[in-house]
Amino acid sequence: MRVECPNCGAKGQIDESKRPPGVNSIRCPKCKGSIPLDVVSAVVATETMREEPLAAPVPPPQPPPAATPPPLVEPPVTNICSVCNKPFPREEMVRFGPSLVCAACKPTYVQMLEQGTSTPGSFRYGGFWIRFAAKFVDGLIIGVVNLLISYLITLPIANPADPTSALIAGGISTLANFAFAIGMTTWFLGRFGATPGKMAFGLVVVHPDGRRISYGRAFGRYFAELLSSITLCIGYLMAAFDDEKRALHDRICDTRVVYK
């Protein structure tokens, strides 16, 4: 056991096994002072503790790694088909000169080229005034027929002495006139692609790719044309300022009025 005098600082070694029982101090041979053995034991224990290696500190738990975001996938480059005006990936389209055509429209486009017919973008569109003249002719035809229908319905039903019969005759006549206008317009556009007025001026109503419209589209176009009328005819005037001479009902139904 190593001992140190608290008075003079002298140091030495003693054999712990030879320490008499009950002895709590020894005399310093240098300064003759008393060295308590209990303090020595405490110092020895403290130094022994200091000599023992300290355990390595436990590192704090690390947070889980952040999830790696998925790589960004760039959208494919798309182009507009010159026939159907729909977007398609560039690798799915075929180029014909300056035009790009999708796979579905390719046979139609090739057939149009072989026949020498007008391809999309090369139409000669019917302007505002020529369409106004065609509409005037259609209005004359419908007006004359409506007068005849009204006369045939009103004459046997209406009674001057009975106002109710006159109202009934007027209602039936109005419905019949409306039905005739719808039927005539739908049938001529679906069958010939033009009403009598448009036929007189060499105009036809077609799809943007030059195909004739169906009866269903012709039927819907009639009601879309009513919107052009109830907007103070502004829907008709739109044709005067559009590059493709489209009126409001042409925009709604995706149709064009062109020369044959």
Image: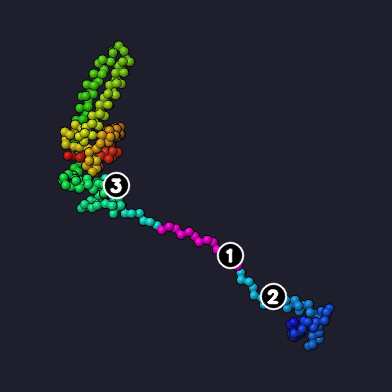
Q: State which quadrant residue 39 falls in.
A: bottom right
Residue visible at 18% across and 42% down in the picture: 124
Give the mark nearer the N terminus: 2 vs 3.
2
Is most of the magenta stretch helix, strand or loop?
loop
- The quadrant of the rendering that contains the C terminus is top left
Instruction: Magenta stretch: give its range.
Output: 58-71
The relative height of residue 194 versus residue 67 in the rendered view (above or below) is: above
Image location (x, y in percent) of residue 119: 20, 46
**Where residue 73 sits: x, y (%)?**
38, 56
Q: Is residue 30 above or below residue 234?
A: below
The location of residue 243, given as percent across then percent down, is 24, 44
Return the mark for residue 49.
2
Mark sitting on residue 74: none
Q: Would you say the residues marked 3 and 1 are in contact, meaning their CB atoms lie under 8 Å apart?
A: no
> In the image shown, does 164 or 64 lie closer to the viewer?
64
**Which residue in the structure is indicated by mark 1?**
60
Neighbourhood count class around disc 2 (C-alpha, 10 Å): few under 14, some 14–19, many 20 upward: few
